């Protein structure tokens, strides 16, 4: 029995299916968890207000030891570790909310804590044996030991299959000896425990390598290079790490031997959500700064807030932040409800989160104008700190390809099945998977979003229209390109951008519906307006993307780039 | 030592502009307000924790701190936060904010004190929302206990508290025999303001109130929090204070800049008419 497409809300959209029961009602924490989370946030805010000087951390490129110790004793190193292993045992939603708060206050600390627990020891939480958990989690929970995630190599970034670090079996299988190096490892300078990915098969051109995940202690022989000097998040430690004949006992394999790729992907799927939540936090901080600035700055005898161009920026920033927050907490809710597959949702949150933040920080700095550019003020630091989000934990370009290709994998399979069933009509139909059946159903009529509040009827209809458009476009490009779709990045970009906008709109619709049901039209006026504005902005992009499938200048761009590579530079000079 | 601390939640004083009054002026619209513990009550809790410990070993409790608040279910967040910070037990007196006044709260607290038998009742000198500044004084009168208001320092002695109060022109020091009612002012959370008999006089606290670490917040979920009906404490729920209307303060007009002192004097005299 093939899996149901309802395992992933976003993947179902590629079939034209709106699995609305997955996202309605909009998830929320239990009242008990809301209560404890609000007390946690209060403690976190007080600690940061009293102890954290972000300008100094940025200037001195280090988080002071007293601050690190304070973060440890506050309990911020074990947020999602179960209480039986000495952690705080937060749900994903509560974890994301706490990381949002920290992200909004100090990026270096957020990245340090995130590298430790969003990815560093995540493999133990997801795949660790009870013995591994007992051994490592208690110290990781208190921050007595700090974790790092070591995947990237000089010649293998997003391309994990190109990993060169080797793990050779020794002592008749009792241990592995690891050799290789990893670069750009956050917490690399002081981490005690590393999740290291190494190949356990020979490096052969063209063949898929077997990657295995290991828990490696620094004491086993890991060494680090010096801290890199970075554009932003300068208080965090980023180093190269070296593994030279590091002997790791067999018990330290995480997950199955040869299944390290799956471990890495699962860890990153969940880690990306933590990154997105930090972006939400920074956006909120920036909105406070921007609005305060707008009210204080005068030009031509008026507050600059009176000017239309400023109002336009503020409105867009609010709408984009609302959409980002809506999808981040929708995804957190999906994770907490134990749905099988949230890989696309978390990747979308990462891409949208980093790009929303980049646009909000850029506009805020623009509103602050002259002072925005000055080091005495926080704007330029926040801008520098924000930039890395577009790059790490999978570049946004790679993630767009991932979103498009992963989303189209099932429709592609369904198309092949339908073609096969057509050749053998009697036998074939009984074998049709859920995918293909749903495809047949979607062909009979457009899917509806029935649980949206009627006040959002216009928005729901546009959403439905473009879900069906996405399915049509996905099928068209699959028919046209077949397996070659993997090479069609211009097409992938359009597909990815469409589905990202659709997920964002869906998140706004379900959250705004809940707000209206709770507080009525007047009480939910802010949400309704932000939902409408975001939908209008997304609608323009969706329309453009659809039209670009038919008419575009992809080939022209490729030709220009190709010649530029030959020229090696911009080819003209006016002299 | 056993201490009862009375806490009130108030609308977040940092977001006072969110307080809305409907056109009818008959009440304050509390929807959408963020709630915080009354700062002076937080200081009272901090003072209570300092009095029930050796300041050099704050994790070992030496005494009992019971926190009480009056209000609907949501006010339990205030109590949970207090439990996370170190209080041992909590009591919520189920009541509606707009059906309380200082007199009724004091009468209900008296009944609670008679049941709990604390050595000290500590609370903020006033709540920053109504600023009534009544409950501590009325409670002491009803109990016929000694009282010290606006405490800036407290030093525990055998069977008594030595309380420093900042008054115009100096500090007045009172020795109150226990049991007693003490209300506190903001300086009570300075590093050398409060000493139990166990805390060495060389010890210096961190300035301000302590906040809870996350494990303590989670552990506080298991600490006892009981609900008591207001009617069980105060059968007569008549109010002495009745509100006739609410109005926002008039919006401040924009200021002006003056060139020099003579212009300032002339404006104060002729326009503001204050000279």
Image: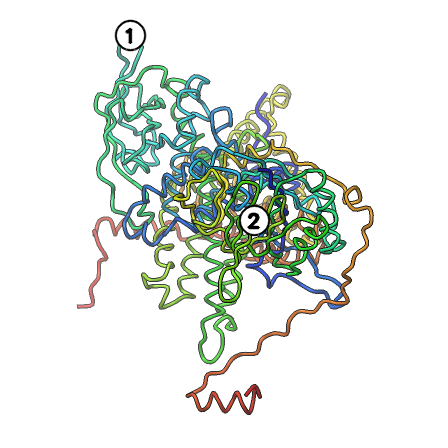
Number of residue marks:
2
Image quarter for residue A448?
top right
A351, above or below A269, in the image: below
Q: Which mark is residue B44?
A: 2
Above or below: residue A7 compared with residue B138: above
Q: Nearer the viewer, residue A382 or B147?
A: B147
- Left or right, A85 with respect to B78, comes to left
Horizontal side, residue B146 vs residue A331: left or right: right
Q: Quadrant of the N terminus of chain B?
A: top right
Dot 2, crowdedness within 10 Å: few (<14), some or many (≥20)? many
Residues B93 and A329: in front is B93
A340 up-or-down from A15: above or below: above
Q: Residue at 32% across / 31% down in the picture?
A: A150
**Callout 1: SS:** helix
Can you see residue A496? no
Few, some or many residues within 10 Å of mark 1 (<14, 14–19, 20+)? few
Q: Residue at x 66, y 41 (%)?
A: A25
Residue A88 visible in the picture = yes
- State the residue lying farthest toward the left: A575
Q: Quadrant of the C terminus of chain B?
A: bottom right
Q: Which residue is mark 1?
A: A172
Q: Position of residue B113 (x, y in %)?
A: 69, 42
- Dot 1 falls on which chain? A
Q: Judge from the rendering whether residue A276 lies leftward or rightward of residue B90; answer left or right.
A: left
Q: Position of residue A251 (x, y in %)?
A: 37, 15
Q: Position of residue A368 (x, y in %)?
A: 41, 66
Q: Residue at x 34, y 34 (%)?
A: A159
């Amino acid at each position: 029995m093939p899996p149901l497409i309802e395992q992933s809300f976003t993947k179902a959209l590629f079939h034209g299916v709106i699995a609305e029961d997955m996202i309605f009602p909009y998830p929320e924490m239990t009242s008990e968890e809301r209560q404890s989370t609000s007390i946690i946030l209060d403690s976190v805010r007080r600690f940061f207000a009293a102890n954290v000087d972000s300008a100094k951390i940025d200037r001195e490129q280090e988080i002071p030891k007293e601050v690190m110790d304070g973060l440890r004793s506050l309990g911020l190193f074990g947020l999602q570790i179960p209480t039986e292993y000495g952690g705080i045992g937060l749900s994903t939603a509560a974890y994301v909310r706490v990381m949002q708060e920290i992200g909004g206050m100090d990026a270096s600390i957020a990245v340090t804590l995130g590298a430790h627990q969003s990815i560093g020891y995540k493999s133990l939480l997801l795949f660790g044996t009870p013995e591994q958990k007992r051994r490592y989690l208690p110290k990781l929970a208190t921050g007595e030991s700090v974790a790092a995630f070591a995947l990237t190599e000089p010649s293998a970034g997003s391309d994990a299959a190109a990993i060169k670090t080797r793990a050779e079996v020794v002592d008749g299988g009792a241990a592995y000896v690891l050799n290789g190096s990893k670069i750009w490892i956050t917490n690399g300078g002081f981490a005690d425990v590393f999740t290291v990915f190494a190949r356990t098969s020979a490096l052969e051109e063209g063949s898929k390598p077997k990657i295995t995940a290991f828990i490696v202690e620094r004491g086993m022989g890991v060494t680090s290079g010096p801290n890199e000097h970075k554009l932003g998040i300068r208080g965090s430690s980023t180093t190269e790490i070296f593994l030279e004949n590091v002997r790791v006992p067999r018990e330290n394999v995480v997950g199955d031997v040869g299944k390290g790729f799956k471990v890495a992907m699962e860890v990153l799927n969940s880690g990306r959500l933590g990154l997105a939540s930090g972006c939400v936090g920074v956006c909120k901080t920036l909105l406070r700064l921007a609005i305060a600035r707008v009210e204080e700055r005068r030009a031509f005898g008026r507050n600059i807030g009176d000017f239309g161009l400023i109002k336009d920026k503020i409105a867009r920033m609010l709408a984009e932040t609302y959409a980002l927050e809506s999808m981040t907490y929708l995804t957190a809710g999906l994770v907490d409800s134990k749905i099988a597959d949230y890989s696309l949702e978390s990747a979308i949150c990462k891409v949208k989160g980093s790009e929303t933040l980049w646009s909000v920080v850029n506009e805020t700095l623009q509103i602050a104008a002259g002072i925005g550019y000055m080091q005495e003020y926080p704007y330029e630091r926040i801008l520098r700190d924000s930039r890395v989000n577009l790059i790490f934990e999978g570049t946004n370009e790679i993630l767009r390809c991932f979103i498009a290709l992963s989303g189209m994998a099932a429709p592609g399979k369904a198309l092949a099945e339908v073609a096969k069933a057509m050749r053998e009509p009697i036998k074939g139909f009984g074998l049709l998977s859920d995918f293909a059946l749903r495809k047949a159903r979607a062909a009979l009529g457009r899917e509806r979003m029935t649980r949206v509040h009627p006040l959002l009827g216009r928005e729901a209809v546009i959403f439905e229209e473009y879900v069906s458009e996405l399915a049509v476009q996905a099928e068209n490009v699959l028919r046209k390109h077949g397996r070659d779709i993997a090479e069609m990045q211009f097409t992938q970009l359009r597909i990815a951008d469409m589905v990202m906008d659709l997920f964002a709109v869906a998140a706004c619709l379900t959250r705004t519906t809940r707000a209206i049901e709770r507080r009525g039209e007047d009480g939910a006026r802010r949400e309704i307006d932000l939902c409408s504005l975001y939908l209008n902005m997304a609608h323009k992009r969706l329309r453009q993307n659809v039209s670009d499938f038919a008419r575009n200048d992809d080939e022209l761009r490729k030709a220009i780039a190709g010649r530029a590579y030959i020229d090696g530079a911009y080819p003209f000079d006016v002299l | 030592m056993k201490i009862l601390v009375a806490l009130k939640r108030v609308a977040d004083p940092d977001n006072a502009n969110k307080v809305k009054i409907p056109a009818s002026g008959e009440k304050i619209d509390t929807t959408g307000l963020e709630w915080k513990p009354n700062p002076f009550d937080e200081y009272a809790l901090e003072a209570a924790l300092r009095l029930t410990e050796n300041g050099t070993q704050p994790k070992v409790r030496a005494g009992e701190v019971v926190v009480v608040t009056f209000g609907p279910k949501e006010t339990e967040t205030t109590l949970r936060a207090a439990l996370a910070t170190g209080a041992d037990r909590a009591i919520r007196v189920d009541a509606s904010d707009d059906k309380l006044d200082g007199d009724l709260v004091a009468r209900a607290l008296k009944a609670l004190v008679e049941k709990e038998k604390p050595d000290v009742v500590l609370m903020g000198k006033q709540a920053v929302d109504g600023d009534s500044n009544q409950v501590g004084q009325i409670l002491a009168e009803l109990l016929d206990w000694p009282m010290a208001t606006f405490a800036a320092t407290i030093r525990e002695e055998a069977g008594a508290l030595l309380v420093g109060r900042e008054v115009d022109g100096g500090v007045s020091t009172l020795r109150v025999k226990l049991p007693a009612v003490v209300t506190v002012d903001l300086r009570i959370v300075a590093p050398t303001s409060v000493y139990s008999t166990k805390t060495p006089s060389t010890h210096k606290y961190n300035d301000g109130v302590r906040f809870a670490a996350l494990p303590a917040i989670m552990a506080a979920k298991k600490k006892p929090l009981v609900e008591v009906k207001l009617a069980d404490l105060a059968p007569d729920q008549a109010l002495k204070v009745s509100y006739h209307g609410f109005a926002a303060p008039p919006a401040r007009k924009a200021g002006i800049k003056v060139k020099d002192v003579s212009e300032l004097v002339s404006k104060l005299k002729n326009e503001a008419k204050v000279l």
